[in-house]
Image (cartoon, rainbow, N blue to C red):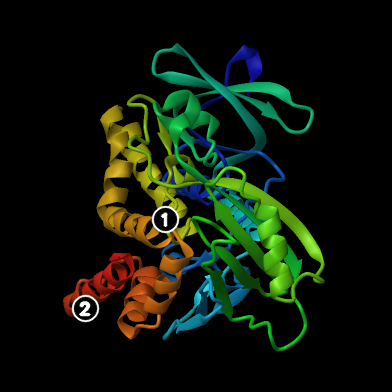
Amino acid sequence: MAHHGACETFDVVVVGGGPAGATAAADLAASGHRVLLLDKAGRIKPCGGAIPPRLIRDFAIPDSLLVARIRSARMVAPSARHVDMPVGDGFVGMVDREHFDPYLRERAALAGADLRDGLFERITRDHAGLATVHYRQGKAGEARQVQTRLVIGADGATSAVGRAEIPGHARMRQVFAYHEIVRRPEGPQHDGARCDVYYQGRLSPDFYAWIFPHGETVSIGTGSARKGFSLRRAIRDLRAGTGLEACETIRREGAPLPLKPLRRWDNGRDVLLAGDAAGVVAPASGEGIYYAMLGGRLAAEAAGAFLVAGDARALAGARKKFMRLHGRVFWILGMMQWVWYRSDGLRERFVAICKDKDVQQLTWDAYMNKELVRAKPAAHARIFFKDLAHLFRWVSP
């Protein structure tokens, strides 16, 4: 390609090959654009790994990638009381990011994207209408560069692309997540079809801890935005308290998760963000894979419109459409996190509310299919007033 000193040129360079970047690259390549997907090899993200039926459907995820099928969630209160929430019809899929992400990258390559192991360094601009992306290739770190009409930054919460190109990115609020993947214990006390979620201040002062089954392994994790809170100690305590301390630890991973979608996902010129880089992890639930993949798809749509028309205003379409679809859910979840995760007393109440059949039904409807079910206004109203009653009984002197 690089004969006569000419620089390779792409329509789009996607930086980061997680679910968002791989999806954007696959969609763009499938629609005939020249795409380079740059991914830093060997990085696995800490993640509970839950994917709802809506994702499996919309993104055609094969059964072979599902390491478990979840049929209920157990909410555990600070007092150790718990509420089980059966999924009802269907199941929540579990994937292991160690296999899920490479599958998505491979799928992008099969669609025609050029997949390379590379570490993004910077963007320079000295050609009209083209950005030059500088990156280091592979282990030896040989410096390379390519030209492109558009860069999609899908390189995580601490996105190097975002920090360099999008005003305000460096101030993005974050939770730090940490998990340990352990070998599944033998014995009946471990239910391979149930996710356990711990709302206990000692395991996370402002988020939650989890034990999610992954077939042969289990993900045990927690998250917090509080400086100085020891995530490792919390996981040690959680493992000790649940009989998982003797299980072999296979790997440990930590990473920042964003707390709220950024105000801007593009620089008005030639850069667009997707996934964690754009801040799309759901508050309160911490769910990210579905939103990342949808964000990647919407980034690809906006990029397609931009490439055809050459109008940078098209790039803002990704965020507009995302917020139209999910802004309300994110706002509600943000309020929930702000209200219920502040103290163990409130967490105790929150878990108690989960006993409510209306709450369970609505939670699963919204989670499984990613839409607030408008058809049930009476249930919404009932929950709203029950929620308020709980809160005020707790908050009033």
Residue 116, percent from left and from top: 65, 37
Read off the residue under disc 2. Answer: 382
Q: Residue furthest front?
A: 397
- Amino acid type of the residue tagged 2 in the rendering: Arg
Which of these two is toward me, 281 or 123?
281
The residue under the point 54% across, 42% down is 156
Residue 100, percent from left and from top: 61, 59
Name the quadrant of the C terminus: bottom left
Tell me if I can see residue 70 in this picture. yes
Residue 87, percent from left and from top: 45, 82
Residue 346, percent from left and from top: 41, 66
Quarter of the image for residue 42 reads top right
- Amino acid type of the residue tagged 1 in the rendering: Ala
Q: Which sits earlier in the primary sequence, circle 2 or circle 1?
A: 1
- Could you tell whether 346 is left or right of 318 in the image? right
Mark 1 lies on a secondary structure that is loop
Label 1 Cα crowd, 10 Å radius (few <14 / some 14-19 / many 20+):
many
Q: In 3D space, how far apart are the residues under numbered discs 2 and 1 (Cα atoms)?
A: 24 Å
Mark 2 lies on a secondary structure that is helix
Give the number of callouts: 2
- Could you tell whether 247 is left or right of 382 in the image? right
Which of these two is toward me, 348 or 380?
348
Which of these two is toward me, 175 or 129?
175
Q: Residue furthest bottom?
A: 188
The residue under the point 33% across, 43% down is 318
Read off the residue under disc 1. Answer: 282
